[in-house]
Amino acid sequence: MAEVVKMPKMSDTMTEGVIAKWHKKVGDKVSSGDLIAEVETDKATMDFESYQEGTLLYIGPKEGEAVPVDAVIAVLGEEGEDYKALLDGENDVDGDKKEKEEAAPEESTKSEKPEEDEGEAVTAESLGATVITMPLLSDTMTEGVIAEWHFKVGDTIKSDDVIADVETDKATMEVTAYADGTLLYIGVEKGQAAKVNDIIAIVGKEGTDVTPLLKSPAAKSGKAEKPAEKADDKTTESTESKAPQTAESKEESQVSSSDDSRLKASPLARKIAKDKGISLSDVKGSGDGGRIIKKDVESYTPAAKAEATPTAAKTEAPAAATTINIPQYVGEERYTEKPVTQMRKTISRRLSETFVIPHFYLTMKIDMDSAIQARAKINEVAPVKVSFNDLVIKAAAVALKQHPAINASWQGDKIRYNEHVNVGVAVAVDEGLLVPVVRFADGKSLSHISAEVKEFAQRAKAKKLQPSDWEGSTFTVSNLGMFGIDEFTAIINAPDSCILAIGGIDQVPVVKNGQIVPGNIMKVTLTCDHRVVDGATGAAFLQTLKSLLEEPVRILA
């Protein structure tokens, strides 16, 4: 009889897995214990062995696809067996929920049908009109207030005319029309607010009746379509910050070098000219009254002007000597997006959960002169090279036995005081951060701890860690000293109540026996869960840690 194979839960934090590779294909014989797939979890890529026997009849997800825990990924059974009924049975587990979901759209369709029929045939394009909506003028804007209308219904406007001033949550900015025609409708009066994408005006042919358009479903939802060819201009102009009015007036009052006429230009044209290093006095405007608009600046070429007016260029040469010419630089904005890995998803979720913990931080300086000497002597005889991080792990483990309140965790209605010491060691990998656990660290030698940490680091980077390797920590150590970091604060690795952040060892002047001498100082910061640990308790732990590292022989006792 056919049986379904489901995505297993391979770690305590796993909610979904990605099929990294299939080792079997449909039609292959599978025995119990056979490796059928590799699954990428939130922490490692792990082998998935079958605990069933039979022929592989069905494979659901393809390689690279994510599947929730307990979702069907394959079906095993006898060769030629019909398995579709089995899949249908799995899909009907949530049948009631699906029926409700299917019923909801039907009801929604029935209720919305009259409105769709009412406005189906009426669009802005069918009327030859253009709808102007409240633009998104800042990243935090949800609505805007019409501070001033510069035109009234019945006026003729151009595509680059500033039709209104809008007060946003950050500044008062201009809204430029992106269509030529007659202003047929104003939807928001001066001083009133409109939400982003709500209709504020309609432009079209004189005498056009826009009442049917306003009654259409699109208009009621504030999502009327804009002409595609104008959308780019609108977006560009609406998202840029406008210069103060005094600066604009000053620019518009400047005199051109050719005919002494007053310069008039749209804000968008000024912005493009400034970005390209083009002087507006060199550009001929094609707008109303010689106003310079976007297309005039974009089509302007300095070479064409130089060829057309050689005499003028010679005449203006002396003035050019006092003018600063900014060279034009054209850059390209681009970015790359990558799917979030399972590890990064879990890191994001777990760190977000820790912000309910009331953190506080304690920092202490430790004299590492004796630790440096002790490490050098230990490495002369040790089978495995011992690092400063290994010394800190061992010292922290010994100190935790003396301060059980630090080796504890918050359990909601009780506090758990752990009698064993399992130290989690933060290990950086390409996708994020893993925390394998050195179990019973207080009872292990420095060489043992060093060998174990090195092995964890290699397996972590190869994605070969197992759930048992990262579960069950009672305290965590995070060391960034090897990266040149002096000090930092770390976020608690729940359910631990504390995490120790280790900075680098700096050679600095210190006072010993009343004299200033060179010293080697390391800063450590203890992050504490205030629900479990008080300030004095954390300080006492750090004092013990300091004494152990400043007299390393006590660690070996």
Image (tube, rainbow, N blue to C red):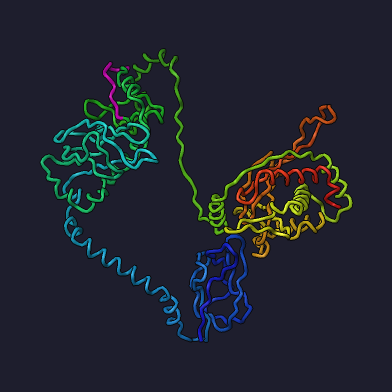
Q: Which residues are magenta?
A: 256-266
For residue 392, above or below residue 165: below
The quarter holding residue 193 reads: top left
Q: As drawn, is 461 to the left or to the right of 277?
A: right
Instruction: Give 393 or 159, whichever is nearer the viewer.
Output: 393
Instruction: Give 378 or 241, whichever is nearer the viewer.
Output: 378
Q: Is residue 396 visible?
A: yes
Q: As drawn, is 130 to the left or to the right of 534?
A: left
Residue 170 coordinates in the image, percent (x, y): 37, 34
Q: As drawn, is 193 to the left or to the right of 114?
A: right
Residue 220 coordinates in the image, percent (x, y): 22, 50
Residue 403 coordinates in the image, percent (x, y): 73, 51
The quarter holding residue 102 reads: bottom left
The total number of labels drawn is 0
Residue 22 coordinates in the image, percent (x, y): 56, 71
Instruction: Give 477 or 287, whichever is nearer the viewer.
Output: 477
| Residue 179 magenta | no
Q: Is residue 485 visible?
A: no
| Residue 265 magenta | yes
The quarter holding residue 140 reads: top left
Tell me the chief SS of the magenta region. loop
For residue 40, above or below residue 550: below
Residue at the front extreme? 413
Residue at the left extreme? 207
Residue drawn at the location 24% of the way across and 37% of the way down: 192
Residue drawn at the location 36% of the way across and 36% of the way down: 169
Q: As drawn, is 454 to the left or to the right of 205?
A: right
